[in-house]
């Protein structure tokens, strides 16, 4: 595998180590494709959730977007409990950390504040059960 490194991605990774939710202030200048590749080299899988086919505007479309973008085939229903179980299974089966990325995360967080709080709790619970920490990036 080619060695890949960049100062921007290294800085983001260092911030991810200490932040449950990382807010990227200048997210337009970050190449998310490169970031996802870099994360793989550090044993993390990154997924851009709001590259989903439909706009995310409520809890239902948020859960659906996460389901499709991560490919959570074990998820049996669109609710928080089912999401948590599917994410636990994903992390366990893939032996890696999980980074959920939102390009428009700051706007979505404002629109769906309660939903993002639940998502943050789920990711924190995953991190408590796993030596590799799971994180959210809001761009």
Image (spheres, grey):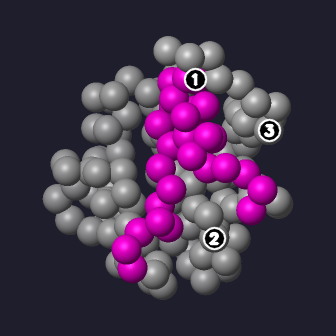
Asked whether the viewer can see residue 121, the reply is no
Residue found at x 34% / y 28%: 94
Mark nearest the camera among 3 and 1 is 3
Using residue 14 as the reference point, say whether residue 55 is left or right of it.
left
Can you say whether 87 is above or below 60 in the image?
Answer: above
x, y percentage for residue 110?
67, 79
Residue found at x 41% / y 69%: 52
Asked whether the viewer can see residue 55, the reply is yes
What number is the disc on residue 92? none
Pick whichever, 48 or 120, lies toward us: 48
Pick whichever, 15 or 55, lies toward us: 55
- How packed mark 2 is, by other alpha carbons closer than 10 Å (few <14, some 14-19, many 20 or more), is some
Residue 107 is inside the magenta segment: no
- Tell me which numbered mark, 3 or 1, is placed earlier along the sequence: 3
Residue at disc 1, secondary structure: loop
- Tell me which numbered mark, 2 or 1, is placed earlier along the sequence: 1
Using residue 132 as the reference point, say whether residue 81 is left or right of it.
left
Residue found at x 71% / y 25%: 5
| Residue on which disc 3 sits | 8
């Amino acid at each position: 595998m080619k060695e890949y490194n960049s100062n921007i991605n290294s800085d983001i990774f260092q911030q991810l180590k200490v932040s449950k939710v990382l807010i990227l202030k200048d997210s337009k200048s970050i190449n998310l494709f490169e970031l996802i590749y870099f994360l793989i080299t550090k044993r993390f899988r990154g997924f851009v959730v709001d590259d989903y086919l439909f706009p995310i505007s409520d809890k239902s479309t948020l859960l659906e977007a996460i389901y499709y973008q991560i490919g959570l085939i074990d998820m049996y229903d669109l609710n928080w409990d089912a999401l948590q179980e599917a994410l636990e299974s994903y992390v366990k089966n893939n032996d890696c950390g999980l980074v959920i990325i939102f390009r428009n995360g700051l706007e979505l967080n404002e629109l769906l504040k309660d939903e993002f709080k639940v998502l943050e709790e789920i990711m924190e619970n995953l991190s408590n059960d796993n030596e590799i920490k799971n994180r959210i990036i809001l761009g």
